[in-house]
Image (cartoon, helix red, strand yellow):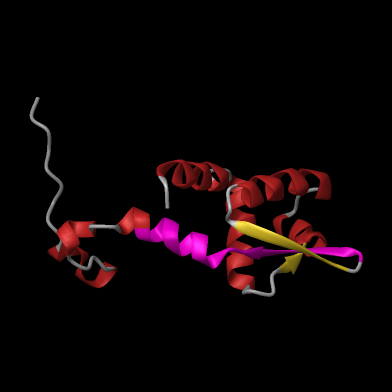
Amino acid sequence: METKSIVRALAAIAHESRLETYRYLVQAGPSGLPAGRLSELVGIAPSSLSFHLKELVNAGLLSSRQEGRFVFYSAEYETMNSLLAYLTDNCCGGNPCLSVNADACPAPHKAHS
């Protein structure tokens, strides 16, 4: 992923409603959820949700598809995985850093003042 795409994706999920919406869609799986159901789950008006969904689609984190009268939104897992890979690239000097062995990761270097 290019740096501009990373920044756009991080900016898109850096909002409480968008992050919550995105998490629901990741959990929903590839079939996604209709916009009306997302509005109910997140507890915001459809017009407000539409704005947030547009931001997530523009960032490449979601896709949409029309099915009859309904618009379904789905998480773009490839984008999500690329973003996670970018964020964890060279984590702990290339060593796996899972929560079970996070203590084994070297401490970050402190700048001297």
Taking the magenta stretch, the answer to whether it contains residue 44 is no
- Which percent across, then down, holds residue 35? 78, 60
Which of the 4 image quarters holds residue 110? top left
Q: Residue at x 27, y 68 (%)?
A: 98
| Drawn side of residue 78 relative to residue 51, left or right | left
Q: Where 11 falls versus 60 (above or below)?
A: above
Magenta residues (range): 69-85
| Drawn side of residue 94 relative to residue 81, left or right | left
Front residue of 83 and 42:
83
Q: Residue at x 43, y 56 (%)?
A: 83
Taking the magenta stretch, the answer to whether it contains residue 76 is yes
Which of the 4 image quarters holds residue 67? bottom right
Q: Residue at x 28, y 57 (%)?
A: 89
Q: Residue at x 75, y 54 (%)?
A: 43
Quadrant where the C terminus lies?
A: top left
- Which percent across, then down, holds residue 9? 52, 48
Residue at the right extreme of this rendering: 69
Which of the 4 image quarters holds residue 33? bottom right
Q: Where 32 falls versus 60 (above or below)?
A: below
- Which percent across, then down, holds residue 4? 46, 41
